Image (spheres, coloured by chain):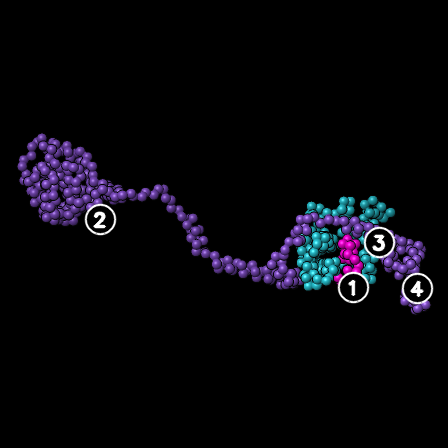
Amino acid sequence: MAQQENKIPLSKKGKREMSPFIGHELLYDYLSGILDDERKNAVEDHVKFSRDAQLDLNKIQNGEAYAKQLADTVVSQPIIEQINLPSTYLTVLMQKSNFDRWPQGLKWGLEALVVVSVIVVLLTVAPWQKVLQLGIGSGNKEVILAEVSKEGTPAPTPSEEKPQFVDEEPKTAKPLQTPQPLSTPEISPAKTVAAKAAATKPVPTPTPTPSAAPVAKKEEDKAEATSGGFLYRGELAVTNLAVVGPKITEKIKELGGRKAGGVELGWQKAPTSTYYHFTLPEAKYQELSNFLGTYGKAHLNKEKHPRVMPDGIIRLIITVDEDKK
Amino acid sequence: MTEADIQSIALFFYFALLDDKKAIEASTQALALCLEKKKRNPEIKHSVALVSATKVVWDRFKARVMRGRPNTSVESGWLIPEGVDLGPWREFQKTASEDELLTVIWSKILKVEDDDISAGLGITQGTIRYRLGRALRKLGTMTQGVSKLKHGTAGK
């Protein structure tokens, strides 16, 4: 009796009766095979006479069979690898902080704060000056067609200071006014013709500075109509130019003459020709003419020129050539 | 953790969430938690740790998933056995209670022993068996219902 009590728990009335409800709830245990024989028989009796119990038993069997089929589902290797990947610091942080459980408003607020912070940092750190300069620089409308670099300087650069006047070749235009007759030996008609021919012949100019020449030309053309200045242009043929040339230079300086063009006084234009471009007090003109007359026949013409000289100062260009005779 | 354990975790969340991407995400978290549990208590059984970890992660994800709106595709890498229709399961996942759903997955799909499930959840074996009985009855109803609909015998 005591053994039976230990083995099977009895009801208050000492019986193990099974109600339909209990029988119904024990269906899964019955199918699992974990009921003792007495309970098993009781459930079988219940199922035998209960249509609902039969249906439920069938359902449980179907459900179990279906679940068994689903159990054969396979997870592909890429998914397993994806799951097996080591967690990043961010994901661990999210897990530790239980970010998923935070209230939605707090999450959104935090995200907004992060975005605003990033924008503020970007606006503060970004080099806006450079960006603006780049923007303005790209919109520059200046177009450089060509860049010319000046290589070397003209051969004769004896003076560093910028010449006040531009050296030029003698003009072929007829002089407006003949100069005063010089107190030189008489000029033969043949020599006069030769001298005229020489005057019309183009003489290579000393290389003027590239930038100054066009400007000077332009100024000349522009002012030609309205100009009121004069230039004394002349030629002189001498014997032994090598000796006479420096003497003329010295004399010009002595008379107060100063170089006017880009070259020094007495510049060796050619082996048999020197060039003088200078300014001189007008009062000394006659004296210079006399001096030149002692070396040869000088032809000095007064030409009209746009540049107006200061009162009392004249400008002269004289070419001294070796006499070919 | 073995590859079989990882597969079990993945299957649990696939059938519980019916969402490819979230299943992977949840599985990653559950695996990490499982490893942590094993590290903290090396004596714990794999299956017990698995049940415990999957339950914790499920609690995190259940609010994020709208049950009854599956988000799965055939090409996603979850290889359902040929000839098996997921329709009854979708219906079951939608209508079953949380306890029933999870217990069926652990017990019948992952083949975890009832002892381990009860140990992992901290409840009695009787409760587990009771939930299983109810859950299988529902799942069986779903399979019959879908079968009837498929064969055109519904309502006859």
Instruction: Find disc 2 in the rendering and name its residue.
Output: A160
Point out the tag, 4 or 3, that comes first from the N-terminus. Answer: 4
| Chain designation of label 3 | A
Q: Judge by depth and name the residue closer to the eye, A171 or B29.
A: B29
What is the count of numbered marks?
4
Magenta residue check for B114:
yes
Label 3 crowding class (10 Å Cα cut-off): few <14, some 14-19, many 20+?
many
Which amino acid lies under the numbered mark 1 shown in the image of this protein?
Ile
Instruction: Find disc 4 in the rendering and name its residue.
Output: A16
Residue depth check, mark 4 versus mark 3: number of the one nearer the observer = 4
Q: Give the range drawn in magenta.
A: B100-123
Circle 3 sits in a helix, a strand or a loop, which is it?
helix
Circle 1 sits in a helix, a strand or a loop, which is it?
loop
Instruction: Find disc 3 in the rendering and name its residue.
Output: A60
Magenta: predominant secondary structure element? helix
Q: Residue at left 72%, top 53%?
A: B4
Magenta residue check for B12:
no
Q: Do the residues labelled 3 and 1 touch (CB within 8 Å)?
A: no
Check chain identity for marks 4 and 3: say if they share one: yes
Instruction: Find disc 1 in the rendering and name its residue.
Output: B123
